Amino acid sequence: MAKGRTNHNPSIRERAYAHIQRKIASGELRPGDAVSELALSKELGTSRTPIREAIGQLVAEGLLEQVRNRGAVVVELTRQDIIDLYELREALEVYAVAKVAHETASRSDLERLTSLTNEILVLRDELRQSGESALNDVQMHRFVTCDLSFHTLLIRMAANARITKVLNETRLLMRIFSIHRQGHNAALLEGIHRYHASVIRAVSRRDPEAAARALSEHIKTSQRERLEDFDHWEREASLRESLPAFLDTHATTGSR
């Protein structure tokens, strides 16, 4: 009797899974875009079977959804989705940071957190010197990178692999909507810096309540901003849909 075996090397599926995630996180695959098994198999130089399995896993995790006659597409988050994701993020991150603050954080971790937080002020200063009102795409990429690194390091300091995995998936889902995000202005950058600095101070002096409070306020503020962004894009989308009809009606009336 032959021993049980898989149809292919699991690492190929894992590589396909990570490849699709990167395309979503970078914005190359946008909300509503179809995911082509054939194109991905050519890009990765593999059969379509591991691609199909990776897509199935991403559907199960909520990053993709199956649409009739289109196959798997990148999800388009609703307003309630954003609320749910932020509530989950707050529950897990606040718990994690309180756990971190109960212990003595290493000097290297605190220095890294401080360095990532100071990078926000570097971006603010660059913005002021440029005379622009908001960060450009390159600067926003730098901001997202240092902000994500800050929160990821905090979670890793809590040493809970399951919380880390869930929050990584949650952040990638939120990243799908954040593709629409406008560049941050100086006031917003300063506010984020204040929250991050407050968390670091609380962790440094081993004050779980203060750390949890600062991070909770930070996440709630971010949630309000993302919901405002969502409402703005909804209004813009509605306007784009109604404008052609308005112009057609106006042209018809004007020709009489």
Image (cartoon, rainbow, N blue to C red):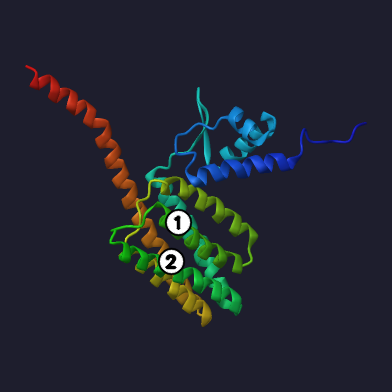
Q: Callout 2 environment at 10 Å: few (<14), some (14 to 19), or many (20+)?
A: many
Real-space Cα separation, disc 2 to disc 1, in angstroms: 10 Å
Of residues 227 and 21, the one nearer the viewer is 21
Image-quadrant location for residue 236: top left
Say if residue 189 shows up in the picture. no
Say which residue label 1 marks.
87
Residue 207 spot, x, y in % from top left: 50, 80
Where is the N terminus found, in terms of image quarters?
top right
Asked whether the residues under the numbered discs 2 and 1 touch, taking CB atoms below 8 Å apart as contact, a structural biologist would say: no
Say which residue label 2 marks.
216
Secondary structure beneath label 1: helix
| Amino acid type shown at disc 2 | Ser
The disc label shown at residue 248, or none: none
Residue 9 spot, x, y in % from top left: 76, 39
| Amino acid type shown at disc 1 | Glu
Q: Residue at x 35, y 54 (%)?
A: 183
- Tell which circle, 2 or 1, labels the residue nearer the N-terminal end: 1
Secondary structure beneath label 2: helix
Q: Callout 1 environment at 10 Å: few (<14), some (14 to 19), or many (20+)?
A: some
Residue 210 spot, x, y in % from top left: 45, 76
Q: Is residue 190 above or below residue 86?
A: below
Kindly give the residue lying farthest to the top in the view shown: 256
Residue 52 spot, x, y in % from top left: 64, 32
